[in-house]
Image (spheres, rainbow, N blue to C red):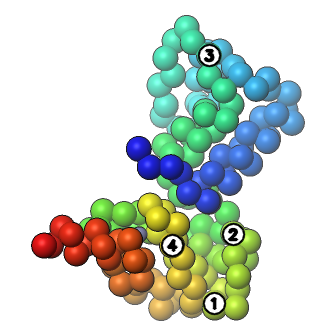
C-alpha cells in the first residue's frame, strides 16, 4: 500500500488534533472508534473488541472520505489514463507557493504539483501523465 501524501495526512492530523482537544485519549476502543467514524459521516467498519489509535483512525477516515475534506478543495478526478487521483486545490489554503498560480493540481499518488489558473488546470486534470513524471513512467510502461 502506498504511503498517504501531504494533504490527506494534514487533514488527518487536523482531525486528530480536534479529537484530542475534545478530550479523546490517544487510543480508543472499537465502540468509540465506530462512533467517531459515524460522527465524521464515513462508512467505516471497525473490528469489534480491539483498540485503535486516533492517528490510524483519522487517516482511515480521510482515506474513506476522499479529498473533499482537504484544505482549499475545489474538485477531483480519478484519471482514466493512469488510474491516479488528481485534486484541484487553492494554493494558499494548502500552504503552497502562489507565485505560479492561485490554484494547484496535486497527483495524490506521487505528490507532484502543478500550479496555474483554475481554468487551465482543469484541462490538465484528466492527464497527469502530461505533468507528473511518475505518472508518465507508469503510463509508458503500461503502453509498452
Ligand atoms: Zn503521478
Look at 63% across and 38% down and name the residue there.
58
For label 1, being within 8 Å of ligand 1 is answered: no
For label 4, being within 8 Å of ligand 1 is answered: yes
Q: Residues within 10 Å of mark 2 (few under 14, many from 20)?
A: some
Q: Which mark is residue 134?
A: none
Can residue 76 be seen from the camera position used here?
Answer: no
Q: How many marks?
A: 4
Residue wearing tag 1: 101
Q: CA distance from mark 3 to mark 1?
A: 44 Å
Going from the N terminus, do you reach mark 4 or mark 1 first?
1
Q: Quadrant of residue 92?
A: bottom right
Location of residue 53 with respect to 91 vertically, above or below: above
Residue wearing tag 3: 51
Residue wearing tag 2: 94
**x%, y% of residue 89?**
59, 73
Q: Residues within 10 Å of mark 3 (few under 14, many from 20)?
A: some
Going from the N terminus, do you reach mark 4 or mark 2 first?
2
**x%, y% of residue 80?**
26, 68
Task: Nearest to the eye among marks 4 and 2: give it.
Answer: 4
Image quarter in which the N terminus is found = top left
Q: Which mark is residue 112?
A: 4
> Farthest residue toward the top?
49
Look at 38% across and 71% down and name the residue there.
134
Going from the N terminus, do you reach mark 3 or mark 4 first?
3
Q: Judging from the image, what secondary structure is the residue with disc 3 in?
A: strand
Going from the N terminus, do you reach mark 3 or mark 2 first?
3
Amino acid at each position: 500500500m502506498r504511503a498517504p501524501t501531504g494533504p490527506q495526512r494534514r487533514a488527518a492530523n487536523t482531525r486528530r488534533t480536534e479529537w484530542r482537544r475534545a478530550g479523546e485519549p490517544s487510543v480508543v476502543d472499537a465502540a468509540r472508534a465506530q462512533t467517531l467514524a459515524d460522527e465524521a459521516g464515513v462508512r467505516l467498519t471497525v473490528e469489534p473488541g480491539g483498540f485503535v489509535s486516533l492517528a490510524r483512525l483519522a487517516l482511515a477516515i480521510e482515506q474513506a472520505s476522499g479529498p473533499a475534506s482537504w484544505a482549499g478543495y475545489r474538485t477531483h478526478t480519478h484519471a482514466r489514463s493512469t488510474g491516479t487521483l488528481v485534486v484541484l486545490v487553492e494554493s494558499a489554503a494548502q500552504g503552497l507557493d502562489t507565485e505560479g498560480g492561485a490554484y494547484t493540481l496535486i497527483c495524490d499518488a506521487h505528490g507532484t504539483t502543478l500550479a496555474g489558473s483554475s481554468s487551465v488546470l482543469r484541462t490538465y486534470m484528466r492527464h497527469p501523465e502530461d505533468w507528473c513524471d511518475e505518472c508518465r513512467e507508469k503510463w509508458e510502461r503500461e503502453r509498452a
